[in-house]
Image (cartoon, rainbow, N blue to C red):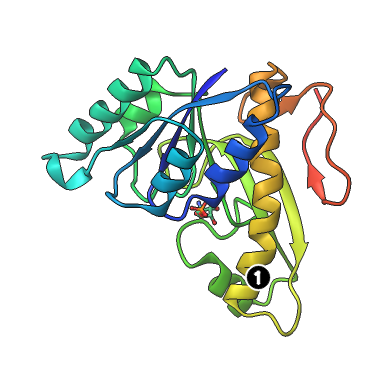
């Protein structure tokens, strides 16, 4: 399955997917990486992996819809069937979300539906919650909503600050994002109402990863 990855920054989740793709048994391939930010570190990582990159600066477009339309053109030109948001820091228009409905996924560094939005690590610590984690989900137009494909949970320790917690969660992001892409590419993932069922998948050892079996 050809996949497009949309980025704005560091690109560590994109890298985790590229690393997974290096295994010939992995059922997906990154056909294009698109950034709205020129010079984003993710672009260099993609180029090092020999993947086509495209920069589409959002400031060059009069409105969100026109920018999103340009992004769709690039995704379609690359023949992609799945769009993976990996630290893409732009809200997407309703039109884009509908066009790519059930073919557009995101990763968020919390156990959704708790802690949507930005600065989640700080907010989790301030709220005193004992567990954090990350969520891979299909994207709906409202920010950080949509059917949940997989989540991984991590403990929050008394001495944690936003950076230590973010690092612990990021490690699990790099586990569940390539896994979710794999399940989708293998045709194991089915959306049923607002829930997702995954058939015949096996979670990796050493992580608290959970999904709903079909
Ligand atoms: C990750 O924490 C991800 O959950 C969030 O943005 C961050 C992107 O990091 N959506 P990276 O660019 O993948 O390193």
Give the quadrant of the C terminus: top right
Q: Quadrant of residue 211?
A: top right
Vertical comparison of 43 with 31: above or below: below
Q: Look at mark 1 in the image and give the residue it sits on.
A: 165
Q: Residue at x 68, y 27 (%)?
A: 182
Instruction: Locate residue 126 relative to residue 53 in the image: left or right.
Output: right
Mark 1 residue's CB less than 8 Å from ligand 1: no
Tell which residue pokes out farthest to the right in this image.
205
Camera-side residue: 59 or 31?
31
Instruction: Locate residue 106 relative to residue 44 in the image: left or right.
Output: right
Query: Percent position (x, y) of residue 184?
Result: 65, 23
Q: Residue at x 39, y 30 (%)?
A: 52
Instruction: Locate residue 129 relative to residue 166 in the image: left or right.
Output: right
Tell which residue pokes out farthest to the bottom in this image.
159
Task: Inspect this view and state whether residue 191 appears.
Answer: no
Query: Percent position (x, y) of residue 14?
Result: 53, 43
Query: Percent position (x, y) of residue 15?
Result: 56, 44
Vertical comparison of 82 with 20: above or below: above
Dot 1: few (<14), some (14–19), or many (≥20) neighbours within 10 Å? many
What number of labels is visible? Answer: 1
Q: Quadrant of residue 51?
A: top left
Task: Inspect this view and state whether residue 26 appears.
Answer: yes
Callout 1: SS: helix
Q: Residue at x 60, y 34 (%)?
A: 147
Q: Residue at x 29, y 49 (%)?
A: 37
Give the quadrant of the N terminus: top right
Vertical comparison of 170 with 146: above or below: below
Query: Percent position (x, y) of residue 122?
Result: 55, 74
Q: Quadrant of residue 181?
A: top right
Camera-side residue: 86 or 97?
86
């Amino acid at each position: 399955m050809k996949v497009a990855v949309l980025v704005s920054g560091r690109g560590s989740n994109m890298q985790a997917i590229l690393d997974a793709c290096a295994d010939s048994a992995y059922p997906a391939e990154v056909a294009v990486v698109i950034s709205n930010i020129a010079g984003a570190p993710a672009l260099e990582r993609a180029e090092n992996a020999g993947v086509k990159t495209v920069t589409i600066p959002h400031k060059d477009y009069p409105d969100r819809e026109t920018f999103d339309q340009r992004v769709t053109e690039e995704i379609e030109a690359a023949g992609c069937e799945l769009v993976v948001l990996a630290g893409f820091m732009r809200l997407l228009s309703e039109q884009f979300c509908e066009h790519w409905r059930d073919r557009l996924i995101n990763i968020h560094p919390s156990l959704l539906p708790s802690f949507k939005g930005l600065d989640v690590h700080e907010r989790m610590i301030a709220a005193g919650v004992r567990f954090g984690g990350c969520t891979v989900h299909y994207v709906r137009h409202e920010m950080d909503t949509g059917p949940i494909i997989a989540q991984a949970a991590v403990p929050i320790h008394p001495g944690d600050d936003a950076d230590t917690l973010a690092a612990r969660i990021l490690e699990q992001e790099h586990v569940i994002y390539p896994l979710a892409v794999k399940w989708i590419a293998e045709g194991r993932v089915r959306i049923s109402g607002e829930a997702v069922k995954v058939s015949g998948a096996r979670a990796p050892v050493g992580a608290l990863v959970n999904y709903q079996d079909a």
